[in-house]
Image (cartoon, rainbow, N blue to C red):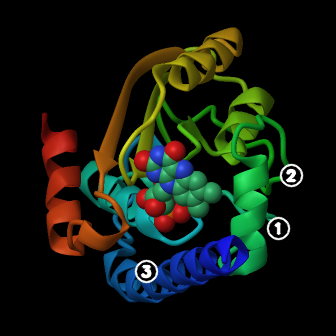
Amino acid sequence: MVLLTITGFAIAIVSIDNSQYKRNKRIIEKLKADNASGNTLVVFFSRSGNTELMARKIAELKKAHVIPIQSERNQIGFRGWIEALTDARKTTTEISPSKVDLSKYDTIYIGSPIWLYSPAPQVFEFAKNNDFTGKNVILFNSMNSKFEQKYIDDFKTVIEKNGGTFEKHIYIIRGRMTQQIDTDSFLKEVEKLIKN
Ligand SMILES: Cc1cc2nc3c(=O)[nH]c(=O)nc-3n(C[C@H](O)[C@H](O)[C@H](O)COP(=O)(O)O)c2cc1C
């Protein structure tokens, strides 16, 4: 009975992830702006596309360049979900690109989903590998309900250790699985965060 409940729960979560991924992909295509002109960079890791929506909207508003972080682990689907659960609190993982020439940027937005109350390992790995000397860094996250400040402070420490100034943490709480905000409201939230 317990096994059946857990299996049902996992199937439900993975199929919600899949449908969000497909929905977000369509919106992301329309949002991909080609208006990058400033010295702001948006770097992000996203599994089911919600953080990517946030990243693309920030980039549109800030006329920023965008670099998606790719990772073989934690992809959409059942296996990636199990991996995300087991990797959630790690700060080391494989990513591509691992190191980026940040010399032409003065502000860098770095974003990911929250997993088990922490930003995903991909953004910790990126923060550890890069030199942020003279840069302002803003961490952005999408999540369902909750993060723990301790992990945000850990991220700030890595940025500062690599020479950066941690400007702020911005985030959007989408709501629990069955009562999440729609994408229009989500994108409006991004606008509010960026214009404040
Ligand atoms: C393994 C796993 C753990 C998660 N843990 C949390 C959590 O601790 N707190 C929370 O608010 N949301 C949690 N979430 C939900 C995601 O943060 C949320 O759906 C996010 O918007 C997904 O972003 P993405 O579509 O860019 O991957 C978790 C999701 C996964 C897959």
Quarter of the image holding residue 75?
Answer: bottom right
Residue 80 position within the rendered picture, expressed as x and y whole percent measured from the top left: 74, 70
Q: Quadrant of the C terminus?
A: top left
| Mark 1 or 3, nearer chain start | 3
Q: At 60% across and 76% down in the image, what residue appears?
A: 5
Report the front residue among 155 and 60: 155
Residue 161 position within the rendered picture, expressed as x and y whole percent measured from the top left: 70, 10
| Mark 2 or 1, nearer chain start | 1
Q: Are marks 2 and 1 in contact (CB under 8 Å)?
A: yes
Q: Amino acid at mark 2?
A: Glu
Is residue 111 visible in the rendered image? The answer is no
Q: At 39% across and 75% down in the image, what residue appears?
A: 32
Residue 172 position within the rendered picture, expressed as x and y whole percent measured from the top left: 30, 48
Q: Is mark 3 within 8 Å of ligand 1?
A: yes
Q: What residue is pinned by disc 2? A: 94
Q: 194 left or right of 38?
A: left
Q: Is mark 2 within 8 Å of ligand 1?
A: no
Please, what secondary structure does the residue beneath circle 1 have? loop
Q: Against 169, is 63 above or below?
A: below
Q: What residue is pinned by disc 1? A: 72
Please, what secondary structure does the residue beneath circle 3 have? helix
Q: At 24% across and 68% down in the image, what residue appears?
A: 179
Count the marks: how many?
Answer: 3
Q: CA distance from mark 3 to mark 2?
A: 25 Å
Q: Amino acid at mark 1?
A: Glu
